[in-house]
Image (cartoon, rainbow, N blue to C red):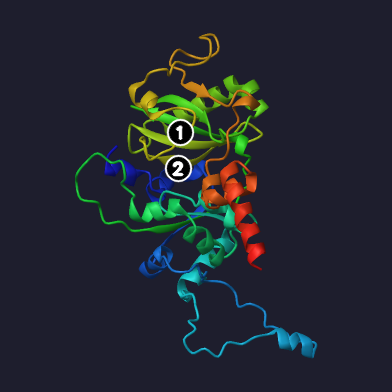
Amino acid sequence: MKKEHVLHCQFSAWYPLFRSLTIKSVILPLPQNVKDYLLDDGTLVVSGREDPPTCSQPDSDNEAEEIQWSDDENTATLTAPEFPEFTTKVQEAINSLGGSVFPKLNWSAPRDAYWIAMNSSLKCKTLSDIFLLFKSSDFITRDFTQPFIHCTDDSPDPCMEYELVLRKWCELIPGAEFRCFVKENKLIGISQRDYTQYYDHISKQKEEICRCIQDFFKKHIQYKFLDEDFVFDIYRDSRGKVWLIDFNPFGEVTDALLFTWDELLSGRNLKGDFSEEVLEQDAPAFRCTNSEVTVQPSPYLSCRLPKDFVDLSTGEDAHKLIDFLKLKRNQQEDD
């Protein structure tokens, strides 16, 4: 995988070529001061938020006594920077896309940070919603700081112009998303995107699903993308229509899902899973979660809380739980 392959997969490079096949989107240049704010490691203070409602006067003397005001001149007040011009552009774009959007940078969306949003979703209606997700996402930080990780060429990193991509919000069913792997302009593998869950309809319709994706690839994607090796994501709706969702580099930086990169790069174990009567000989390998026994935890769970907190709350680590109970007992005895 070379740096030019990564550049060809950024949203603004492929969207003009495949606009009619994908979800309506708006691309906005990301100002340098906004990038600096998103990379700031300080306390998370979200900018772009509407002014909070003014506090009403306390109804009683007792309530007034509970309010404590600090007179300490050394107390630092955290204030978020404001970007009025950029905020206006973003809100205009959101309104033009129906009022709700799915945000991402040149390559990545903040999928690892959905848990921090008030709606536990990547659905955003304001710039502050976007900032909250972006500042909480390791995927976004990687786009900024390591966009060419795993690239094999030693050439200097190209100068990047970062962009905020706003995609019209659509309620997509996870069980209808698939990742497709292309090597030398040949579709070699298809994987269920949400491999952590078992979907009965995928197992029952996998031959039809594979055929639809092959037809879509040959008609709209093959020999039209900028590289011979790449990965693309699609969505198959309830009517059987296939929509293009995204492109990714063909390499370790992209999640291989139910495949391994050793298989994809070497071509081993990639024979089609169907009889020749059903599909042609060069049918891609199709992989899905075949039963509820093979269901796996979400790969984003580790992004939510420190592992110690998770172990304590689930009781998975008995030693940590015992230590915690001892600590509580000692605190009670001290009191």
Q: Residue at x 52, y 36 (%)?
A: 234
**In which quarter of the view is residue 14 placed?**
top left
What residue is at 37 percent from the left and 48 percent from the top?
13
Q: Position of residue 52 (x, y in %)?
A: 63, 77
Answer yes or no: is residue 121 visible. no
Residue at position x 40%, y 66% in the image: 40
Q: 115 or 273, which lies in front?
A: 115
Q: Which mark is residue 46?
A: none
Question: Which quarter of the image is occupied by the N terminus?
Answer: top left
Measure how far apart labels 1 and 2 are at the Cα level: 8 Å
Lower position in the chain sequence, tag 1 or tag 2: 2
Looking at the picture, how far across and down is residue 12, in whole percent? Answer: 40, 51
Position above or below: 199 against 311: above
Q: What is the number of the mark on residue 18?
A: 2
Q: Secondary structure at mark 1?
A: helix
Front-lying residue, 239 or 112: 112
Mark 2 crowdedness (10 Å alpha carbons): few <14, some 14-19, many ≥20: some
Mark 1 Cα within 10 Å, few/some/many (few <14, many 20+)?
Answer: few
Label placed on residue 220: 1
Which residue is situated farthest in the front direction here?
333
For the C terminus, which image quadrant?
bottom right
Residue 188 % position (x, y): 42, 24
Q: Residue furthest left?
A: 155
Residues at discs 1 and 2 in contact (Cβ within 8 Å): yes
Q: Amino acid at mark 2?
A: Phe
